[in-house]
Amino acid sequence: MIPLPRHADAPPVLRVEGLDIAYGTAPVLHGIDLRIGAGEAHCLLGRNGAGKTTLVRAILGRIRPRAGTVTVEKGRVALVPQDIALFPKLTVRENLAAFARLSGLPRGAIGARVAETMAQAGIAERRDERVETLSGGWQRRVNIAAAILDTPRLLVLDEPTVGVDAAARAGLHALIDDLRAGGMGILVVTHDLDEAATLCGHAILLDAGRVVRAGPIADLMEGAFRHDLRLSIAFVDPAEMPRAAALTGLEIAGEGLTGMVADAAGGLHLVESLTAAGIAVRAVSLERPALAHLHDALTAGSAP
């Protein structure tokens, strides 16, 4: 594989500064500032309509901003779309050879680069199988391989594991992490908050066309929740939930109550207050907040 710059001394592979985009007179993105470094994986999160697709189109150079700039190191950015973008009747090797020619690789270098990429993506054993005969997980591996043939500095993945089983998902995660560890910048667009927390060390949360939070996930979680715990309470009689919510200040969520408490002792105190009021508790859980809780807290006012 073509060597990539090591992380610490490398310039950012993506720099977005003051980006404003509008469709006609309707503003879509406002003052977006982002930076993705070599060897970093960032997840782009937000509800439908937040502006994620427009931001990705701008990064790929497919839409002209009203203001601001988008700079990708050496202009080398690749997209792995959510839908499989391969020639189904061709074999894995034939697909990669075709994409290598489309990406402008010299004809004499294509064979070696295809072989190297198949080995890197773990698909060499399937080289002579037609894409249409492969499972969804293998097709997604080939999709990624096609995108990295010319060693992009930034790889954008749109819902990279949608529709695949757990084993295939784990394999794809390992491949993406290998690319990151090799120095490639990774931007993952996903609605799967568990996947985002697994794949990415950084998060970008968009809401109504603005970046509401961006940075290392650990720092974002610490800033939002500090050492708080998330308390969830279920009841023997769900009809008691409104009264229980009034007593505790917790929110009704599904078939129980939920909210943040400073520590386990604070959660126990609330449960004891419910028992004292004659409200029968069926189950109690305390857990560290997850990325999904941060996402929900910061985008609560957005359209679903």
Image: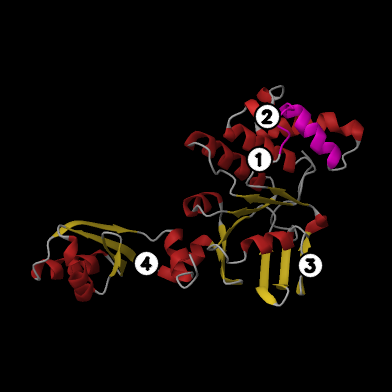
> Which secondary structure lies at badge 1?
loop
- Residue 19 horizontal side relative to residue 169, left or right: right
Residue in front for this viewpoint, 228 or 26: 26
- Magenta stretch, main secondary structure class: helix
Residue type at mark 3: give it: Arg
Between disc 4 and disc 2, the foreground one is: 2
Type of amino acid under label 2: Val
Q: Which residues are magenta?
A: 86-102
Q: Position of residue 197 (x, y in %)?
A: 50, 53
Please give the residue where the numbered disc 4 appears in the rendered image. Answer: 227
Type of the residue with mark 1: Ile
Question: Which residue type carries mark 4?
Answer: His
Q: How many C-alpha atoms fall within 10 Å of the one at disc 4: few (<14), some, or many (≥20)?
A: some
Using the image, tell me which numbered label, if any, was put on residue 131.
Answer: 2
CA gap, disc 4 and disc 3: 43 Å
Residue occupied by mark 1: 84
The spot of residue 82 in percent (x, y) is 62, 47
- Is tag 4's residue or tag 2's residue first in the polypeptide sequence? 2
Left or right: residue 235 versus residue 202 is left
Question: How many neighbours does mark 2 have within 10 angstroms: few (below 14), some (14-19), or many (20 or more)?
Answer: many
Residue 279 location in percent, x, y? 12, 65
The reply to whether the C-beta atoms of the residues labelled 1 and 2 are less than 8 Å apart is yes
Residue picked out by circle 3: 64
Above or below: residue 71 compared with residue 17: above
